[in-house]
Amino acid sequence: MKQFEKQGAIVLGISPDSPAAQKKFTDKHKLKLPLLSDEDKTVTTAYGCYGDKKMYGRTVKGITRSTYLIDPKGKVAKIWRNVRVDGHAQNVLEALP
């Protein structure tokens, strides 16, 4: 997180989970970033990261793990879909302006 802060970046997470569920998750995994709750899925749907996805050969509704880089003017500069943890933070750091 400190590398992002040094670059002037703010890192947030968002999910349709309740604030209580997010607190449990944050505590369990010792997360250092704030999680935003989108229980009605308005924001995650608008960003295209909530909807139909394939899981075990079936179509289900859910979150597609995604990262959005938003530039200082508030425009989406880059999107990563179906994010995997290994190496992802470094890829995002390299994409920062």
Image: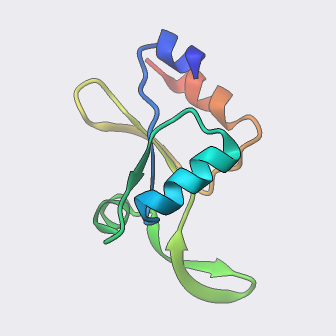
**Which color mode does the image show?**
rainbow
Task: Decide: is 89 above or below 6.
Answer: below
- Residue found at x 63% / y 51%: 83
- In this rendered view, identify the residue nearer to me: 72 or 6: 6
Q: Position of residue 54 (x, y in %)?
A: 64, 80
Please tell me in which quadrant of the rendered image residue 47 appears: bottom left
In this view, the residue farthest toward the left is 73
Task: Decide: is 3 above or below 49.
Answer: above
In this view, the residue farthest toward the top is 6
- Residue found at x 45% / y 39%: 34
Task: Decide: is 46 above or below 76.
Answer: below
Q: Position of residue 60 (x, y in %)?
A: 56, 85
Q: Position of residue 17 (x, y in %)?
A: 46, 65
Q: Quadrant of the C terminus?
A: top left
- Residue found at x 34% / y 69%: 41
- In this rendered view, identify the residue nearer to me: 63 or 80: 63
Q: Position of residue 24 (x, y in %)?
A: 58, 55
Total number of numbered labels? 0
Q: Quadrant of the N terminus?
A: top right
